[in-house]
Amino acid sequence: MCGIAGILCDNIDLRQEKEMIWRVSNSLKMRGPDERGEYISKSAALIHRRLSIIDPENGKQPMRFGKYIIVYNGEIYNTEEVRRELRFHGYIFDTSCDTEVVLKSFHLWQERCAEKLNGIFAFAIYNTDSEELFLCRDRIGVKPLFYSHKGGLFAFASKIDTLLNVKGIEPVCDEDGFNEIFMLGPAKTIGKTVFRDIGELPPASYMYCKNGKISEGTYWHLEASDFTDNEAQAQEHIHYLVTDSIRRQLVSDVPVCTFLSGGLDSSIISKVASDYMGECNSVLDTYSVDYVDNDKYFKASLFQPNKDSDFISLISDYIDSDHHNIVLSNRDVADALVDSTFARGCPGFTDVDSSLLLFCKEVVKSHKVALSGECADEIFGGYPWYHRKEILFEDTFPWSRTTDVRHSILANGFLPHGDEYMRNAYLQTVKKTSTLDTDSKTEKRMREMFVLNMDWFMQTLLMRKDAMSMEASLEVRVPFCDYRIVEYAYNMPWSIKSYDGREKGVLRKAFENDLPETITWRKKSPYPKTFNPEYTEAVIDMVKAVLNDRECPLCEMLNVDSVTELMNNPDSLSEPWYGQLMRGPQVLAYIVQIYTWIKKYNVEFDI
C-alpha cells in the first residue's frame, strides 16, 4: 500500500512550491516509508509515497505510459487475469506490479477499467496532453481518497490532514461538520468529512477534473436480484468465494501474516492461509491483541460473552501457526488516543483505534502485510441488531438508536438541528436500497440493514483499519470485502443466511468441516476491549485537562456538569454511544480526541 496526493492549480506555478510539495509528501511518509516519487509541472503535481509489496524493484511511482501518469494505492487481486486480457489487446508489460496493469487498463478502457478490477484501490491518472485528472476508488471503499475543490484549485490525498498542507485549504468546521462529530461520529456520511473544505470520493466512484470543473460517476452499486441457489448450494458457493478471496490476497513478495482473535472470521482466514502456506512448506504467523490484566477485569455481557484468549490457542494449535500474543499497556492505549486522532485526521473510534495502532506497530516489526477478518458481520448478519426484532424494525440506525446520550454531554442549544441531521442521514441511506417487489417485510428490512451496515458501520471499521495500519506502515487486507461476496450475500434470503437461527449461520455451516466445532459455533464476540480500570482512570485524567483549558472552544460546546458526572460514574450511560464498544470510558475518550483534533489542526469554527 501507499500514500498518494496531487494538486491541480492554474493560479500558482507548482514548480516553485517545493516547500508545500514537501509538506504534502512528508504527511504521507508513514503510509509509504520505502520510496518517495513526484511528477511536477507548472499546473499539476502528483505525489507518491511507497510501501513496497509487489515487485519492489520495478514498481516505482509515479509511473508513466504515453500521455498518462499514475499514482496508485492498493492491491489488485485479479492482476494476472486483467494482464492476460490486456496482452490479448497488444499491450506489453515491463513490470510484474499491478500499478502497470491499472495504468494500461485505463489507457484501453478509460473509466470502465474499474469494472475490470477486483481489489482495494484508490488511484489518480493525469493526462499530460489534455491536463485532465481522473480519480477512482474501489467498490467497497477499503482504500481512502479525499479531495478539495476551491475555485481554480483541486487537490486529492489518501489522508484528510494531508490536504491541510495545500495553500488555500482551511481547517474550518461548520454546523454539518459538528453534526458529523457529535450526532453520527465516529461514523460519517459517505462523501463528507468533518472539514468544510474537504470531501471524500465515495466508494465505487470515479471523478474527472479539468479546467477547474469536476464531474463524478458511479461504476458499481448493490442491486437486488432473484436468488436461485438452494441452501446447500449457497453454503458451497460461499465456501468457494471466501476461500478464493483469501488465497488471492495471500499473494505478496514479502511475508504475510494474519490477525487471529479466535472468532469465526479470523479463524477461517487463518486456516485457509495456513493451508496455502503449507503448500509452499511455510508456517503461518498469527497475531492477537490483549491488554495487561484483562483476564482479571473481564466482564461478560450480551455483546461480549467470553474472552478471545480462551479460544486463540485452540485454533492456533489446530492450524499449527506460529502465534504471537501482543499484550498492550492500558496507559499506552490511553496515550495513543492522541496519535490515533492524527492518523485519522479527525476524532475516531477511541481505544478501538488506539489499541489497533499500537498492535500494528508491533506486528510490523516482523511483517509488512497482514490479513484481517473485518466486515463479515455486516455482510452475513453478525451483529445483535440483525437478530433482535425489537431493534431490527426500529426506524433508525441500530447502533445509535437515539441522540439522547449525545445531547446529554452537549451544552443546551448546541446543534439545534442535530436530530434532523441524523434522521436525514438514515433516511437517505434507506431510500437508496435496492429491493424486489416480491421481498417480504423481513427481507426488505434485511436489505436495508445490509446497506445501512455497509455504508456506515463497515465504513467506520474500514477507515479505522486503513488509518491505523498505514500509520504503522503495515498493509492490512480484508478478504471479506471482496465485492463478489458482497453481491452474493446481498441477495441471499435471510432464512439461508441465518442458518440454524445463528448470526453468520451460512458462513459457519460453510466452514464447519474446516474448523474445530468450538470455534465454528462460538457465539460472536467483538473486537477485544480493555476492562482494566487503569485505562478509564488515565482517560479521566485527560478529560480533566480538557475541561481546565477554558481557552479551547470545546468547553463551550459541552455540558461540563454532565461530563463531570460521567467522569465520576463512567458506567452510568443508559446505552452505548455507538455500536457495542463505545460506552462511558469511550465517550470520555472521544472528548479527548475531539479536543486533540481542535488543538492539532487549529480548527476554525463557522457555526
Image: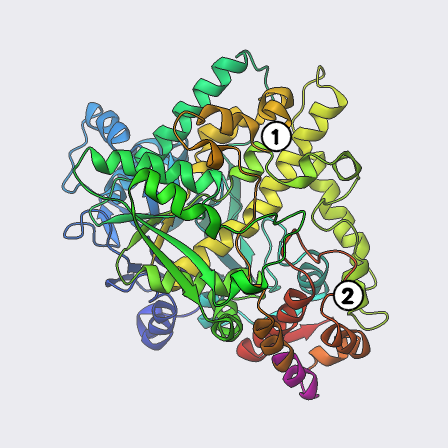
**In front here: 530 or 401?**
530
Q: Which of marks 2 and 1 is nearer the N terminus?
A: 1
Say if 556 sits above or below 204 in the image. below
Looking at the rendered structure, the kind of residue marked 2 is Ser
Residue range corresponding to the magenta coloring: 542-552
- Residue at 55% x, 32% y: name it: 221
**According to the image, label 1 marks what residue?**
502
Name the residue furthest right: 412
- 552 relative to 322, above or below: below
How dense is the environment of label 2, judged by Cα within 10 Å: few (below 14), some, or many (20 and up)?
few
From mark 2 to mark 1, how far is it between C-alphas? Answer: 31 Å
The reply, left or right, for residue 220 in relation to residue 403 is left
Q: Can residue 457 be seen in this view?
A: yes
Prevailing secondary structure of the magenta residues? helix
Q: Residue at x 19, y 42 (%)?
A: 282
Query: Residue 334: x, y in percent?
Result: 53, 73
Name the residue at the front extreme: 296
In terms of image quadrants, where is residue 318? top left
Q: State left or right for residue 446 relative to residue 320.
A: right
Q: Is residue 195 above or below residue 576?
A: below
Instruction: State the mark number for residue 572.
Output: 2
Q: Can residue 222 be seen in this view?
A: no
**Residue in the picture at 23% in, 38% down:** 277
